[in-house]
Image: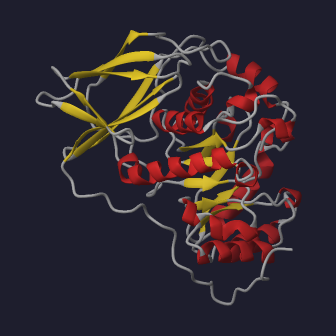
Amino acid sequence: MIRMIKLMISMCMLLSFLITGTDVKPPSPTETGESQFGFFPTGLYTVPYENIPEIQPAGFNMVQVYHDTQTLDEAIAYLEAAQANGLWVMQNMPRDFIDAGDEFWIEWVTRLSQYDALKWWYLPEEPTLRGVDHATLRRLYDIIHQYDPQNRPVAMYFGIIGPLDQWCDIADLIIVGCYPEYSQAPRACMKTWIDAAHLGCPSTPLVGAASLFDSRTFGLPGGYPSPFQARFDAYTALIDGAQGLFWFSYADGVQIPELWKGIHSLVAELNSLAPVLQQGSAGLEIQARVLDGPEQSLPVNGITYNSIQFMHKGNHSQAHLFASNLSEKPVRAEFSGLPAGLTSVTVLFEDRTLPVSQGAFSDDFAGNDVHVYRLWDETPTAAAPQAAPPSTTAPGETGPDQPG
């Protein structure tokens, strides 16, 4: 998932790929901004088989495990355990078997595709950093789509900022994000990484990758994000167009009680907003203006952004505004262009309301802060987020009690 060489390569490639100093919202994968997944993904990397029962009660709905020598029986056992615990799986394609013949991979895809818990396939990640060529992964991609009757999406993760355009034809969705402590970069780097993926593969839906680990584990001094910073990372990815989130990683994060508890609270927030996050744009002409504080973020690889980033979601019955401060210093901002007749907005998760006057309101942001505003809501209480399918075992398929 993470390689020390990543940052050096990324900096060089980004400078040739993005225009320095711009802050342009990349195109949305759909004209309306609606989710292309049909659910809101909240996933965890590196979930061992024995810890699967702990994940769904914590609010997550997807799991993944790195296992470069995973056997077919081990993969089946993992899928069965996930399904029994109401989870979906992003199914790893074992790296050590990447050069195996077509017969191996055809059997792999044919048998595993029988399990409803399998949601996405996951090609070996970081191909550019690991020297894996396009043709090798194209072969796996084609086998998946030929032999999976449900034609499930194929996901890829990249450990570089860009360019990614050479991989667009073999990635049905891209998982991308920045780990600020590891990269020793301003937190605005989350936008940098996601912008580059949007620009490289503009029609490919994205899932944000967020930090849930201590960079000192990898020999770097940055440490790990606070719950406050982790909340910023997640919402900033969503505001910039990610349609779900995966955290790297459970195995590391569970060892950091403060952060793990904070992620629990964050996922509960996101689950309560899942129906909203799957909606399209609210169709409003909202504008943001900095009244006090920095108007621009700190530079990331020479690129700066407007401090206040935002998106709105909703319809005639309800509308929400999501805003984050990419500056690491406090900012007071005004939001204008709200509909006439609106007299107040509710700041969710903060027990606050703010007055609206002539279609505008203002609010204070700490450095790298996030606010979620409910502009109006005339709908009944939202239903619980979609869960993974109930436990069923594919006909004739059995596996060991647990992977070896």
Picture quarter containing residue 322? top left
Check the image and name the residue furthest to the bottom: 396
**The N terminus, quarter of image:** top right
Q: Position of residue 223 (x, y in %)?
A: 75, 33
The residue nearer to you, when weighing 395 against 259, is: 259
Which corner quadrant of the image does residue 146 belong to?
bottom right
Q: Is residue 327 above or below residue 73?
A: above
Residue 197 appears left or right of 381: right
Q: Viewer-proximal residue, 47 or 204?
A: 47
> Residue at the spot x=52%, y=69% of the render?
388
- Residue 237 is situated, as x and y percent measured from the top left of the image, at 53, 36
Taking the spot 49% from the left edge, 38% from the top edge, the residue there is: 238
x then y, percent, for residue 199: 56, 29
Q: Is residue 354 above or below residue 149?
A: above
Q: Quadrant of residue 192?
A: top right
Residue 253 screen position, x and y as percent: 71, 49
Residue at the image position 17 percent from the left and 21 percent from the top: 357
Residue 171 appears in view: no
Q: Which residue is outermost to the left?
A: 341
